[in-house]
Amino acid sequence: MIPESMETGRSFVSHLGRSVTIEQAAELMGVSRRTVYYRIRDGRLRTIRTLGGSQRVLLESMHDHRRL
């Protein structure tokens, strides 16, 4: 379940940017970090790597995930 704030679209995205940390993604979706990693592995969530090597979840893929 994605919080109502995610459904507001632009203002939410401009506040967070285009990606969130694994922890933030888990909190926004109401799941554990492990579930986020499973969904990444299964291709249900898309990520990017930062220059420092951290993995971040693209908000766009979280919106797409709501429809699965």
Image (spheres, rainbow, N blue to C red):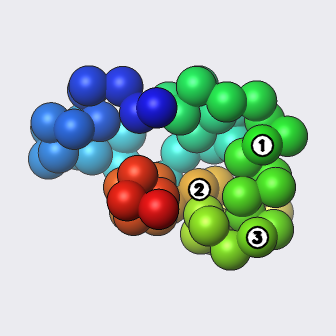
Label 1–label 2 contact, CB within 8 A: no
Estimate the spatial distance between the alpha carbons at disc 1 and disc 2, rounded to whole Å. Answer: 13 Å
> Quarter of the image holding residue 46?
bottom right
Q: Nearer the viewer, mark 1 or mark 2?
A: 1
Q: Which of marks 2 and 3 is in front?
A: 3
The residue that disc 1 covers is: 35
Instruction: Answer with mark 1 or mark 2, whichever residue precedes in sequence.
Output: 1
Q: Position of residue 58 (x, y in %)?
A: 50, 60
Which mark is on residue 42?
Answer: 3
Q: Can residue 33 be seen in the rendering of this structure? A: yes
Which residue type does callout 1 highlight?
Thr
Q: Position of residue 41 (x, y in %)?
A: 81, 68
Which residue type does callout 3 highlight?
Asp
Label 2–label 3 contact, CB within 8 A: no
Q: In this view, does 67 lie above or below 43?
A: above
Q: Can residue 18 be seen in the rendering of this structure? A: no
Instruction: Answer with mark 2 or mark 3, whichever residue precedes in sequence.
Output: 3
Estimate the spatial distance between the alpha carbons at disc 3 and disc 1, rounded to whole Å. Answer: 10 Å
> Residue at coordinates 76% horizontally, 70% vertically from top-left?
42
> Residue at coordinates 27% horizontally, 46% vertically from top-left?
13
* Most foreground residue, 44 or 57: 44
Q: Is residue 45 above or below residue 21?
A: below
> Residue at coordinates 59% horizontally, 56% vertically from top-left?
57
The residue that disc 2 covers is: 57
